[in-house]
Image (tube, rainbow, N blue to C red):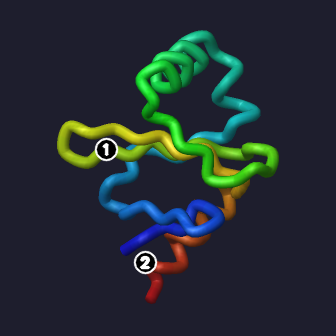
Amino acid sequence: MYLHLGQNVEAKEKEIIGIFDMDTSTIGKITKDFLYEAEKKNLIESVAEELPKSFIVCQKDDERKIFISPIATTTLQKRTEMRSLV
């Protein structure tokens, strides 16, 4: 199944490593360094021009991708939970 991340971007749920809140998780130095290094390696894709609320880390084989999304982590979590009920 796919998770809609915003605009026309979707990620396979089985490839998602984690969904993180931009406000709370980017306070720490380790997360800031992680995102900085990912940006230098061109691994970050911004999903929309709106204010970012979350970032989603995906891994497929040896390829990592980080999506910056305007959708809140709680909304993304609810979307995955609703699919599992169907």
Residue 72 in view: no
The residue closer to the viewer here, 16 or 24, is 16
Q: Residue at x 71, y 31 (%)?
A: 24
Tally the marks. 2
Closest to the camera, between mark 1 and mark 2, is 1
Q: Residue at x 47, y 17 (%)?
A: 37
Residue 69 vs residue 10: left or right? Answer: right
The residue closer to the viewer here, 61 or 45, is 45
Query: Callout 1 environment at 10 Å: few (<14), some (14 to 19), or many (20+)?
Result: some
The residue closer to the viewer here, 83 or 47, is 47
Up-down: is 70 above or below 81?
Answer: above
Residue 28: x and y, percent? Answer: 64, 16
The residue closer to the viewer here, 1 or 10, is 10
Quadrant of the image occupied by residue 12: bottom left
- Amino acid type, callout 2: Ser
Element type at mark 2: helix
Q: Residue at x 48, y 40 (%)?
A: 66
Query: Residue lying furthest left in this view?
Result: 61
Image quadrant holding the N terminus, namely: bottom left
C-beta proximity under 8 Å, tags 1 and 2: no
Q: Residue at x 34, y 38 (%)?
A: 64
Up-down: is 29 above or below 48?
Answer: above
| Residue 84, numbered label | 2
Quadrant of the image occupied by residue 86: bottom left
Residue 69 in view: yes
Q: Earlier in the sequence, mark 1 or mark 2?
A: 1
Residue 75: x and y, percent? Answer: 67, 63
Query: Callout 2 environment at 10 Å: few (<14), some (14 to 19), or many (20+)?
Result: few
- Amino acid type, callout 1: Gln
Residue that carries the numbered disc 1 in the rendered image: 59
